[in-house]
Amino acid sequence: MNPRRSYAAGTGLFILLGFAALAYLATQTTSLVNFDSGPSYDVTAEFTSVGGLKDRAPVKMAGVRIGTVESITLDQKSLDAKVTLAIADRYNQIPADSYAKIMTSGLLGDQFISLSPGGSPDNLKNGSVIANTQSALQLEDLIGKFLTSGGSKSASGSSK
């Protein structure tokens, strides 16, 4: 076999495998893989800012995916973002006073909703509202605060 032909075949195979790997990563990181939890119940939570949260984003508890973000709308009265969560029916023992916060996967990854359990004897059910929420942390706001603070100096330095 001609060495040039062997290099061309190897290069073509390498490029093909590269595209296959990119396609796999694209479906895994953008939540194109559907989460089919079967029957679910809906709960809502209001946030002052949802950042880059999107429909079909995961809802997780203790790192386990328990549902998805069904919709994000603007509440006309409070002017907050109203997020509807579809939680799988098999996770029906979540305390009603649980805490919902918008988190980011990694440093620049997709956002998701993380639920932290409360201590209430009552559980979330269809139509419940999660009152304890924490909005998305905006990287741009943090950078702006750091730049405008001028790198404030510590108060523990020596005084003259």
Image (cartoon, rainbow, N blue to C red):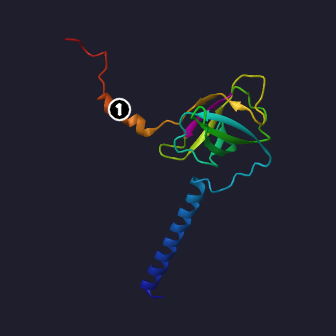
Q: Position of residue 149 (x, y in %)?
A: 32, 28
Q: Position of residue 153 (x, y in %)?
A: 29, 22
Residue 97 on the magenta segment: no
Q: Quadrant of the C terminus?
A: top left
Quarter assignment of residue 77: top right
Quarter assignment of residue 87: top right
Position above or below: 5 against 30? below
Q: Nearer the viewer, residue 92 or 13?
A: 92
Horizontal placement of 109 versus 158: left or right?
A: right
Horizontal placement of 49 versus 64: left or right?
A: left
For the record, the magenta segment spans 98-103
Q: What is the residue that sits farthest to the bottom in this orientation?
A: 1
Q: What is the residue that sits farthest to the left in this orientation?
A: 160
Q: What is the residue that sits farthest to the top in this orientation?
A: 160
Q: Residues within 10 Å of mark 1 (few under 14, many from 20)?
A: few
Position above or below: 12 against 129? below
Secondary structure under badge 1? helix
Q: Position of residue 81 (x, y in %)?
A: 59, 38
Position above or below: 33 against 67? below
What residue appears at the point 70 percent right and 51 percent down from the top-left corner? 35
Q: Nearer the viewer, residue 42 or 88?
A: 42
Residue topped by disc 1: 146
Q: Amino acid at mark 1?
A: Phe
What residue appears at the point 70 percent right and 31 percent down from the top-left corner? 129
Position above or below: 154 against 20? above
Q: How many numbered circles are shown?
A: 1
Quarter assignment of residue 83: top right
The secondary structure that dominates the magenta segment is strand
What residue appears at the point 31 percent right and 15 percent down from the top-left corner? 156
